[in-house]
Amino acid sequence: MTALLCLTTCPDPDSAERIAATLVEERLAACVNLIPGLRSVYRWQGAIQREAEVLLLIKTHPDRYPALQTRLTALHPYELPELIAVESATGLPAYLHWVAENTRPVE
């Protein structure tokens, strides 16, 4: 059994909370951790940007990633949101099962 850890950043706590709650409510994520206080330096449209952001750590099942990607893109305030998914090599089996159960669509 495996899980994905997806990373994205948001410009403020309100948008981060809204996205996290929606993803969990819609069973696209089993859990989302919000980590405030992040400072990002990046190039955007030819200029170096420096911004305070909130990092979201999104735990989901690989089967749910396409729907999560679509929904995150629709919810996110950025023109081009960051979304990187890392597949777990291993994990506590009971936790991985919990992620799978809590991202399974309700029938």
Image (tube, helix red, strand yellow):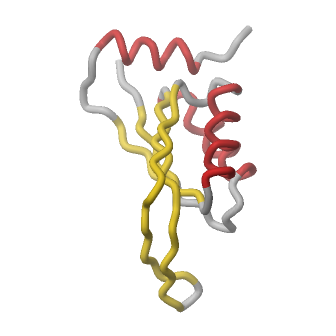
Quarter in which the C terminus is drawn: top right
Left/right placement of residue 101 relative to residue 20 reads: left
Total tally of numbered discs in the picture: 0
Viewer-closest of 101 and 77: 77
Q: Picture coordinates of residue 1 (x, y %)?
A: 35, 18
The quadrant in which residue 80 appears is bottom right
Which residue does the image show at 69% across and 25% down from the upper left? 25
Left/right placement of residue 94 relative to residue 99 reads: left
Q: Picture coordinates of residue 76 (x, y %)?
A: 69, 55
Left/right placement of residue 41 relative to residue 88 reads: right
Asked if residue 24 is positioned above or below residue 96 in the image, the reply reads below
Q: Picture coordinates of residue 105 (x, y %)?
A: 67, 17
Asked if residue 25 is positioned above or below residue 11 in the image, the reply reads above
Asked if residue 50 is positioned above or below residue 59 in the image, the reply reads below
Viewer-closest of 102 and 38: 38
Identify the residue at the far bottom of this view. Answer: 46
Q: Picture coordinates of residue 73 (x, y %)?
A: 68, 52
Which residue does the image show at 68% across and 50% down from the upper left? 14
Which residue does the image show at 64% across and 24% down from the upper left? 27
Left/right placement of residue 45 relative to residue 26 reads: left
The quadrant in which residue 18 appears is top right
Asked if residue 102 is positioned above or below residue 83 in the image, the reply reads above
